[in-house]
Image (cartoon, helix red, strand yellow):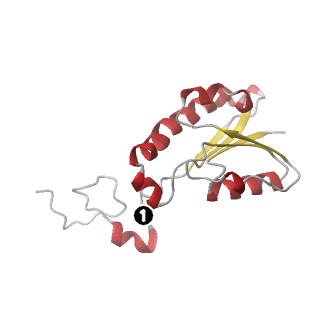
Amino acid sequence: MSKTLVTGAAGFLGSHMVRRLVGEGREVVGLDNLSTGKAGNVAAIPGGGTFSFVAFDVTDPAVVDLPELRGVTEIYHLASPASPKFYQARPFDTIAVNTTGTMHMLELARRCGASSPSGSGRPRPRIWCRRSSCACRRGRRARRWRMSSATCSASPTTSSSTSTG
């Protein structure tokens, strides 16, 4: 059976992901520091799979050495305050989760064999990360949030009339 890690497991998105994966019969480890998530979101996870919860912060370097995380084959890195109320109140914590926390999850994936050859017979871990809700806006509302190419080289749309000064 593959082992799946969901960071931010006690948050809105994370708890729904945990429920779905456990419902599919997967072994799931939920990780959350409970700074914005609620333990009640994962208190009574239904389903046929196995679920364990670890209260820990992804920004702590020791996270890659936790025994509960050995042998993970999938990582859903969903840890990050998603509400403006939270990430504006604690911007540096949000940046740490989105940078240092992501770096730790990539290191965990590497330790679990992400760099191993595909023919090794071992399952290769996969990692999925979500963008911070404040990082990028696309779709119908993109015009409200658009930055000119002179301001942001990663803007989703580029206007030929933008002056670079």
The reply, left or right, for residue 111 in relation to residue 143 is: right
Give the number of callouts: 1
Q: Is residue 36 left or right of residue 30?
A: left
Q: Amino acid at mark 1?
A: Arg
Residue 37 coordinates in the image, percent (x, y): 61, 52
Q: Quadrant of residue 71?
A: top right
Q: Position of residue 31 (x, y in %)?
A: 66, 42
* Quadrant where the C terminus is found in the figure: bottom left
Residue 156: x and y, percent? Answer: 37, 61
Image vertical order of residue 30 relative to residue 146, above or below: above
Q: Between residues 116 and 68, which one lies in front from this camera angle?
A: 68
The answer to whether one can see residue 119 in this image is yes
Rendered view: 83 above or below 115: below
Comparing 127 with 50, the one in front is 50
Secondary structure type for disc 1 = loop
**Residue at the image position 78 percent from the left and 28 percent from the top:** 121
The answer to whether residue 53 is left or right of residue 23 is: left
Q: Is residue 64 left or right of residue 162?
A: right
49 vs 1, nearest the viewer: 49
* In the image, farthest residue toward the right: 48
Q: Is residue 116 visible?
A: no
Residue lying furthest left: 165
Q: Residues within 10 Å of mark 1 (few under 14, many from 20)?
A: some
The correct choice, above or below, for 140 with respect to 51 in the image is: below
74 or 44: which is nearer to us? 44
Q: Residue at x 70, y 59 (%)?
A: 16
Q: Which residue is mark 1?
A: 137
